[in-house]
């Protein structure tokens, strides 16, 4: 998926990073949709999560794949671990980093069964999911 698959809109200057923390090119324009996605990620309280689809629904624009693409490209400067898969599985390749954040923030987790790959817990989506309840404050 390319940036062309993001909803079309004007860009703004930013120097955010992807999940791996690698910076984008200096002065590179950040698409306005990406800026909105990252703003939502920053609103999610510690210990809570939203799914990629929740973020798209909250914005009333795009979909889970577009949100995931934004997070992969630019999410390193925001609490990326709070935007998750709907099944609660930890982000592949970033499980240990995310798990450290979840434990530090008290995010509800479901301990992994012995049969689970890598014995990693999942996010307890029923308890951890945030609906953006305070979103009307300061949201335009």
Image (cartoon, helix red, strand yellow):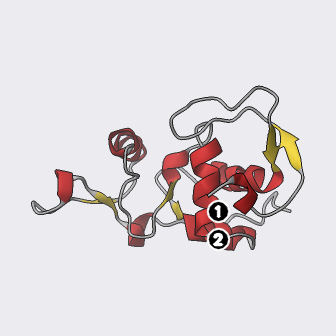
CA gap, disc 1 to disc 2?
5 Å
- Residue 112 screen position, x and y as percent: 19, 59
Q: Camera-side residue: 77 or 2?
A: 2
Looking at the rendered structure, which numbered label has been put on residue 63?
2
* Residue that appears at 61% across and 41% down: 78
Answer left or right for 117 relative to 47.
Answer: left
Above or below: residue 35 compared with residue 27: below
Determine the residue located farthest toward the right in the rendered image: 10
The answer to whether mark 1 and mark 2 are in CB contact below 8 A is yes
Q: Residue at x 61, y 55 (%)?
A: 69
Q: Quadrant of residue 124?
A: bottom left
**Residue 47 at x, y = what percent?**
46, 52
Structural crowding at the residue carrying mark 1, measured as other residues with C-alpha within 10 Å and reported as few (<14), some (14–19) or many (≥20): many
**Residue occupying image coordinates x 63% and y 35%:** 17
Q: Which residue corresponds to mark 1?
A: 66
Q: Residue 10, percent across and down? A: 90, 53
């Amino acid at each position: 998926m390319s940036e062309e698959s993001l909803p079309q809109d004007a860009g703004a200057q930013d120097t955010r990073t992807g999940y791996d923390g690698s910076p984008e090119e200096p002065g590179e324009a950040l698409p306005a949709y990406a800026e909105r996605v990252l703003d939502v990620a920053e609103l999610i309280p510690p210990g809570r999560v939203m799914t990629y689809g929740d973020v798209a629904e909250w914005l009333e624009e795009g979909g889970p794949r577009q949100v995931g693409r934004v997070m992969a490209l630019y999410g390193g400067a925001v609490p990326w671990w709070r935007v998750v898969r709907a099944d609660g599985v930890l982000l592949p390749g970033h499980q240990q980093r995310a798990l450290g954040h979840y434990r530090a923030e008290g995010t509800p987790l479901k301990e992994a069964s012995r049969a689970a790959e890598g014995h990693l817990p999942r996010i307890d989506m029923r308890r951890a999911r945030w609906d953006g309840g305070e979103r009307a404050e300061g949201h335009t």
